[in-house]
Each structure stands twice: as C-alpha cells, then as structure tokens.
Amino acid sequence: MESCKNSLLTGLVALNIDLEEHKVAKLLAFVQLLEKWNKAYNLTAIRNKEAMIGLHILDSLAVAPYVQGPRIIDIGTGAGLPGIPLAIFYPDIEFTLLDSNAKKTRFVQQVILELGLKNITVCHTRVEQYQPELNFDTVITRAFASLPDILALTTRLLSEQGILLAMKGQATDIPELENAQTTIIPIHVPDVDAERCLVKIQLTK
C-alpha cells in the first residue's frame, strides 16, 4: 500500500487538499476494502489498487470544493463514490448515499462500519421511490442518465437554494435547461488521462 499512499499524497497536493493523517488512512483502508470485496461483488471495473487512487479517490475529491451545505445526497453511489471519500473529507457534513443495487449498498454499509464513519446514511432504493424527510443542499451524482432525466428525477430533493452536481467526462451534449442555470466546471484529476467536468445546475424561479 506504500505506493498507493504515495500516489494519494501526491494527488492531494496537486488538488491543493490538505488531509490529516487519519483521513488519509481511512481513504487507503477504503481502497483496500474495495479491492477485497470487488473480487466477489464486482463493484467496479477497476481492479488495481493504484488505479483506484486516481480514478475513484482523487476523482471524488476533485469535486470537494463545489459541494455546499450541511446535507448532501449521492445518487447512484454504487461502491460509495464520490460519497465515501467526500464524507471522510467533510466529517461535519451529513451524507446520504443512495443506490438500488443491494450488493453495493451492503458493501457501503460494511465500509461505514469498518471505518467508523458517523456522518453517512445508506438508502437501498430507487431515486424515484425515495422520500426524504428533509431536502438536500447538494445532490451529486456520477451522471447516470441524461441531464434532463437526472434533473427530472432529482429536482424534488433539492432545498430552496440547493444545487445539482453531475460528474461527467467530456463537456458535450449538455443542453440548455429551462428554469435552471447551468455552469460547466472543468475538473483536472491527477494521474487520470481523461477529460472530466462537473455540471452545476441551480434552479431558477
């Protein structure tokens, strides 16, 4: 894991993120759990621990400056991405991680247990069926559908000043959306040789 730690620390410096040692340790423990469970649960196509550092951990943390508010939901979290790295980074923010895949939510529950993460709630359901008691300041997702579809499914989950953050690859096919202000934010992920962007959407009245 030493090479993974070095890659992580180098990437954090490139992202201008300063993490305490215990948070770095939790991120590395998450990668180890991901690699271990991946063999049986097929959580991610990425098999190599070092590749997971860039494609999963740093990719998740690269969007950290753009999340807002005390309540955040990660829609279609899968293996806990970007939710778990962000929850480790922001221990005082309340995260809800939602996914319809039972194997993946079981894995996320196990990670929470083993890493002692107190600020995460896991929901095993489809977003269409989810009824929160309180709405969210940020809805974040690794784009699981077209932006109009994502907006249609998640708008009701946003608080009055809430934002939707959709993590995408290339900044193409991003439509003009009615009653919404759209901002495209280029994202550079260290050690990832692929285009990344974050689409920020805020509803307008």
Image: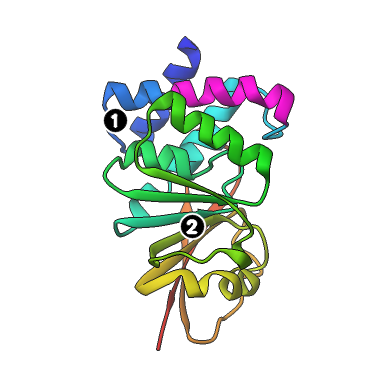
Question: For this rendering, which residue is in front, 104 or 24?
Answer: 104
From the image, tell me which residue sits under label 1: 19
Residue 137 location (% of width, % of height)? 36, 64
Q: Which is the main secondary structure of the residues drawn in magenta?
A: helix
Residue 139 location (% of width, % of height)? 46, 61
Q: Residues within 10 Å of mark 1 (few under 14, many from 20)?
A: some
Q: Quadrant of residue 162?
A: bottom left
Residue 117 lies left or right of residue 33; in this view the side is left
Q: Amino acid at mark 2?
A: Ile
Per the image, label 1 sits on a secondary structure element best described as: loop
Residue 62 lies left or right of residue 38; in this view the side is left
Residue 188 location (% of width, % of height)? 47, 45
Res. 67 in view: no
Q: Which residues are magenta?
A: 28-41
Furthest-bottom residue in this view: 205
Q: Nearer the viewer, mark 1 or mark 2?
A: 2
The colour scheme used to paint the residues is rainbow
Q: Amino acid at mark 1?
A: Leu
Taking the magenta stretch, the answer to whether it contains residue 35 is yes
For marks 1 and 2, give the CA distance: 22 Å
From the image, tell me which residue sits under label 2: 140
Q: Is residue 201 above or below residue 188?
A: below
Residue beneath the point at 41% across and 43% down:
120
Per the image, label 2 sits on a secondary structure element best described as: strand
